[in-house]
Amino acid sequence: YTIKKFAPVADVPTIRVHDLRHSHVSLLVNLGFNANIIADRLGHQKIETTLGIYTHLYPSGRQKVSDLLEEYIIPVNLNDYYTA
């Protein structure tokens, strides 16, 4: 009831309480919190529950990991080490 009452006052869309929960998880994922901490906040007894529901929020993390690893890997020219 409170969301429906005050959303128009704040000039934001009316959403369900469950959507707030999902937004909260999205924010935590984007801030870099790990799934164990998020599962604990949500009251999930098993991390699999959290990951099963919110896995789709993590794909951007794959690119971030790839980008970070690329910074630390020194490109090697294999031709420098190959002798025919």
Image: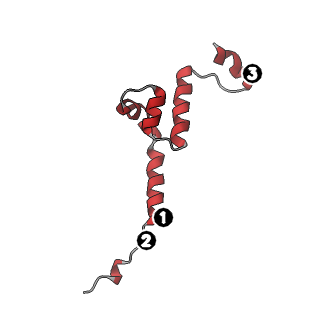
User: Percent from the top left, x then y, of residue 6?
Assistant: 70, 19
Identify the element where label 3 is drawn: helix
Residue drawn at the location 73% of the way across and 25% of the way down: 10
Say which mark, if any, is on residue 45.
none
* Residue pictured at 42% horizontal, 67% vertical: 73
Mark sitting earlier along the chain (1/3)? 3
The amino acid type, in three-letter code, at marker 3 is Val
- Look at mark 1 in the image and give the residue it sits on: 71
Name which quarter of the figure residue 5 lies in.
top right
Would you place residue 5 above or below residue 19 in this image?
above
Per the image, label 1 sits on a secondary structure element best described as helix
Front residue of 13/23: it is 23
**For numbered disc 2, what is the local secondary structure?**
loop
Report the residue marked by disc 3: 9
Q: Earlier in the sequence, mark 2 or mark 3?
A: 3
Q: CA distance from mark 2 to mark 1?
A: 8 Å
Crowd tier of the residue under label 1, counting other residues whose Cα lies within 10 Å: few below 14, some 14–19, many 20 or above: few
Label 1 to label 3: alpha-carbon separation: 47 Å
Label ID, residue 74? 2
Q: Amino acid at mark 1?
A: Glu
Callout 3 crowding tier (Cα within 10 Å): few <14, some 14–19, many ≥20? few
Task: Give me the residue at 48% from left, 29% from top.
Answer: 41
Q: Please tell me whether mark 1 or mark 3 is closer to you in this view.
A: 1
Q: Amino acid at mark 2?
A: Ile
Question: x, y percentage for residue 11?
Answer: 72, 26
Which quadrant does the C terminus fall into?
bottom left
